[in-house]
Image (cartoon, grey):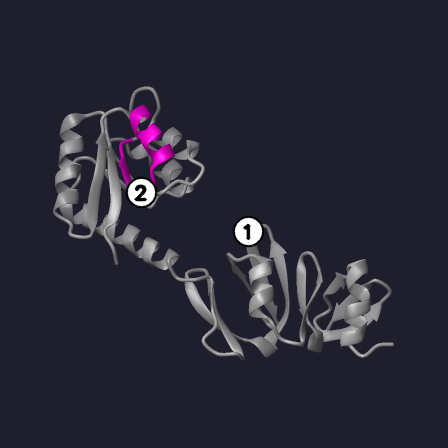
Amino acid sequence: MEKLACIVIDDEPIGREVIETFVGDIPFLNLVASFGDPVEALAYLQDNSVDLVFSDIQMPKINGMELLRSLLHPPLVIFITAHRDFALDGFEAGVTDYLIKPVRFDRFLKAVNRAKERISASHIPAIQQPFTDKIFVKSEGKLIKILLSEILYVESQGDYLKIVISDASYMTQLTLKSMDEILNQPNFFRVQRSFILNLEAVRSINGGTVELINGKSISIAQNKKEELFALLGIK
């Protein structure tokens, strides 16, 4: 794994120097910038990509929480502050860890290792297909094996896909277009904009709706109806 690019943000010079020293003692971290002014740090983050931010919370002009929330694509953040009261807000905002000053190196290292694990996990592809009859889906931090024959349908839900089998469902971050390419087999059909279904899971068709063996009803796009009927052998 390459070194993680990180920055330090703290308006207190002594606190900033302590974290800079800690970062320098960890081989897989690369300190690319350090800021005493959070506004300068925000401008840097808007133009540059980093893996990890070490930030104080209570700072002039803009606090660490506001800085984090202002970023469209925030990196992982470890807050370092003297104020314990901010911990809950920090974790709710998706912060990786929360360290109380004065920071011990062993506690700092634990937080950094947690960030490293999260970054490593994010580099695992959402779906891996080492064989033609199965896929491995990244869901809830795990790679889950799913036989293609088990899939009843796949539903697009924003930036995520819901993959449904007979006794479970899994959410993974992938587009339906990508999944359509993965399920490039005769028994899978994109019946409308948000659904791909397994033709083997079809129980009945009622007008413009197809019902699957698990009771799920899915509407058929008008321009897909003729092709679906042909694939099912319906004349």
Left or right: 203, with 157 as reference point: right
Q: Which mark is residue 188?
A: none
Q: Earlier in the sequence, mark 2 or mark 1?
A: 2
The boundaries of the magenta stretch are: 39-56
The CA span between labels 2 and 1 is: 23 Å
Left or right: 102, with 40 as reference point: left
Left or right: 186, with 84 as reference point: right
- Residue 176: quadrant of the picture: bottom right
Task: Identify the residue shown where x is 16% and y is 36%.
Answer: 102
Task: Identify the residue shown where x is 70% and y is 71%.
Answer: 214
Instruction: Check if mark 2's residue and mark 1's residue have beta carbons within 8 Å.
Output: no
Where residue 66 appears, as percent x and y from the top left, is 39, 29
Under circle 1, the secondary element is loop
Query: Quick check: can you spot residue 158?
Result: yes
- Residue 101: quadrant of the picture: top left
Task: Identify the residue shown where x is 34% and y is 54%.
Answer: 118
Under circle 2, the secondary element is loop
Query: Quick check: can you spot residue 58?
Result: no
- Can you identify the residue that label 1 sits on? 159
Q: Which residue is nearer to you in this view: 179 or 172?
A: 179
Where residue 27 appears, as percent x and y from the top left, is 15, 52
Q: Quadrant of the C terminus?
A: bottom right
Task: Identify the residue shown where x is 40% and y is 43%.
Answer: 94
